[in-house]
Every structure is written in structure tokens, then in C-alpha cells.
Amino acid sequence: MAPLVSTKNDYIELSSTLNEDDEPPDMRQQEQQQLAYPMGHKRSASIHRNSMEALLEEANDLTPQDDDLAKTSVTTTRPKHLIFQSLPSLIVSLVGLIVAGVLMDEYQHWDVFLKTPELFILLPILLNLKGNLEMILASRFSTSANMGDLDYGPVRRSLVIGNLALLQVQALVAGAMAGLASFALGLITRPDSISSYYESVYMTCSSMVSASFSSAILGVFMCALILICRHFQVNPDNIACPLASATGDIVTLILLAGCAVVLQNHMESLLSTFVFLVMLSLVPLFGFVVWKNKHLKDLLFVGWTPIVCAMVISSLAGVVLEQYVEKYKGVALLTPVLIGVAGNLGSIYASRISTCLHQDTHENYTSVERVLFLMNIPVQFVFLVIIWGFDMGQLDYNFWFFFTYILVSLICTFICLKIGKWMTIGFWKMGYDPDNYVIPYLTASIDVLGTVLLVITFSLLTSSGANDMSAPGNMQTSSLDNASR
């Protein structure tokens, strides 16, 4: 009994239904939290599963004073709540995707990128790795919020510090992997180029610094956002993943460009080596912080497989994109938004299902899938209006272009929602925490699928004469071929 007395005043209610006595959760809530956390490689085999009849009976027996307590533990499934909470974040993520595309287009003319073309190889690899890390954090922390673990001071502080430290470990390792991979790919694609030790360290150092600093900024932002959502009774599952994806790309791009410019002036010196060693020494430091955290200790050595596999799978999309980006107009402009919006919708769905599985509550799959599927239409409509209004991509905006693009986006969204549902439930049944495994595989799969579908659509439009999607250089080649025939 002594531990219960000593921890009584350590619990601080964060939700809007404040507990004036500052009491710890009852024994039932403690049991649920112990079963759910630490959420590591394997879930506890003794997870208590209530039948749906028992949940419905318990909900019907709630007294008025218990109603607020129920709201803190059951995921909101009303369509209007989902729309009001998710649509603004999806619009913001759309703007973020467009801004990221504009930045990438601007960077290709910078002197630092012209002198070091490997930086362009680094960009998609680093953005993919970093995006997955931040979305995993958003999904995992959203589950913690909906489970009520963030309502109590010691647990909240432990989870915030542990998640930020874990994100630094993952970002530093992922940054090193991305830097070395981009340098190696640069040697393969440009065998005649002269590369040196200094250039390899320069690439790796720039990647690690930008990944670490962007993770620090975005990690604090996401934790604060989810805590605010919890306080105002907003389900963070509906908004966290899209915002993590959108802001992550922009911040990482800006930091990478800044680091590359600063370090390029000292490329032939030992400055990059010194910075690299400093960043490398931070890995065991942050790793020790995570190791001492009982809630996240197990996550230090798990979750790397989906991140690495996602990088490999996404590279296939990069190969397809590289082959057709100069053949068809608008591929570079449309692909990131097409796969980005579908991936965000699928991530919202997967995050919601994961929370329900941890809470042992029921998700209305049909209703949520329908709402998320239809939500893709206004988001894509806003995107098409923006690129049409600013005449971006030098596209021929006719009926067939709009129709086929919307159709492909709906197909991608439908498939992404289904894959997200099957993966989340599948990993849960196999004993793995979906928060740490689903999103990397989901986003990587939709990267390949969306890119292939868009290229096929553009090919059909061009071959049928409905819309000439050929790039200007390719159009001249086609004309010469037809003349020779």
C-alpha cells in the first residue's frame, strides 16, 4: 500500500475533465496501462479482451457523472468530428507538399546542389526516412494520449522525454544511412566522377545534422500538439500524422540546404569529420536515455526493419519516377501530392485502428473508411485549383486530365485505406504493435503504386489522343519518329 500512497500526488489530470483530488487511475486503468506499455516488439500475451456486448452494456449503464470519463477513453467515430478535425490538417499537409515541391525545384539551381549532385539523390531518401519516423512518433504518442497515459505528470514527462530521445537516436542513425546510401548511389550513377573521403563525410554529416535538428523541432511540436489535442478533447489520430508529414518535409529541406551551404565552404577541411564524430557520439547518449526509460526501453532495438524496408521499396518508386519524369509533363509536380494525400489518409485510418485495438474498443470501419475516402475529393480539388490558377507544370488542363487524375487519386486512396486496415489488424494479431510497424510499409507501398498508376494514366491519355502529356523534348522526338515512318 505504501507505493500507492506515495504516488497519489504525482498524477496530474491533463484532459478537460480535471480530477480535483488529483487521484491516480483506479486499479482497472492501471491494469490496462501495464498491459499496453511498454509498447515494444511484442505485445503482452495476457491482454484482456472485453466482448462488444460487455462494452455496450457498460456504456448503457453510465451515469451522467461517468459520461465525461467515458469520453476520455473511447475514440470518437462520428463522421462530422472526423471531417472537422482531419480536413484542415489535410489541407495544411497539401500546402506543405506544394511548398516542399517548390523548394526542391528552387534548390536545383543553387550552386551547392550543382557542385554536389548527390544531394538530389539524398533528398528523397532522407525525406522518406524522416517522414516515417515522425509519423510513427505521431501515431504512437496519439495512442498514449487516447489511452490516458498523458493525463498524469510522471508518466507524461517520461513518455515525452523518452519519445524525443528515441526520435534522436532514430534520426541520427537514419541520417547516417541516408547520407552513405546517397553517396554510394552517386558513385554508381556517375562512375566517371571524382569522389573523395571529404565528400562522403560531407554528405553524411549534412544528412545527420539536418535529420537531428529537424527531429528535435518536429518532435517538440508533435508532442505539444498532441498534448493540446488531449486537453481540448480532440482526437490526435485525426490530425497528427498529416501535420507530421507536411511540416517534416519543409523543415528537413530547409535545414539540409542550410547545412550543405555552410559545410561546403569547408569540405576539404576536417570540420565535417569533427561534426560527424560529434553527431555520432550523441547516438549512445540518447540511447542511454531511452534505455533508462521503462516505457520505451524495448523500442530501442525494434522498428528498424520496416524503416529500412520502406526505404528500399520507395527507391523503386524513385526508379520509375526518374525514368518517366522527363517523358511526361507534370509527373514531378503531381506524384508527391497524389501519394502524399493518399498516404496521409491511410495513416489517419491506421492510427485510429491502432488506438482502438490498444483500448479494446470498436472502430466503425465502414463509416470511417467512407468519410476518409470521400475526404480525398475536396483536398485534390483544392490542389488542382491551385496548380491551374498558377499555371504550374505546363499542363494541358482539359476534362480528361482532371477526370483521370481524380480517378487515380481515388483508386490510390481506396487501396491505401484497405492496406492500412489489413496491415494494422494483421500486425496486431501477430503480436506486434501496429504503431511501430504499419506506417513505413503503408507509405512505401503507396509510393510505388501511385507512381506506377500515374505513369500508366499519362501514357493512356497520350496514346489515345485525349490529352498530350508528353514533355516538350519528348514531343519533338515523337514527331521525328512519326515523320520517319
Image (spheres, rainbow, N blue to C red):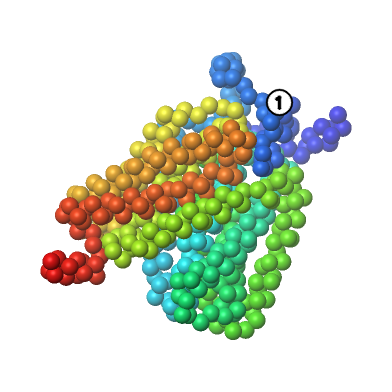
The quadrant where residue 270 appears: bottom right
Residue 225 visible in the current orientation? no
Q: Secondary structure at mark 1?
A: helix
**Residue situated in front as seen by the camera: 5 or 319:** 319
Screen quadrant of the N terminus: top right
| 352 up-or-down from 137: above or below | above
The quadrant where residue 205 appears: bottom right
Residue 132's x, y, as percent? 53, 52
Q: Residue at x 29, y 44 (%)?
A: 407
Q: Residue at x 47, y 76 (%)?
A: 191
**Quick check: 420 left or right of 2?**
left
Q: Residues within 10 Å of mark 1 (few under 14, many from 20)?
A: few
Instruction: Quickly name the residue at label 1.
Output: 28
Residue 7's x, y, as percent? 80, 36
Screen quadrant of the C terminus: bottom left
**Quick check: 310 left or right of 482?**
right
**Residue situated in front as seen by the camera: 124 or 426:** 426
Report the number of numbered marks.
1
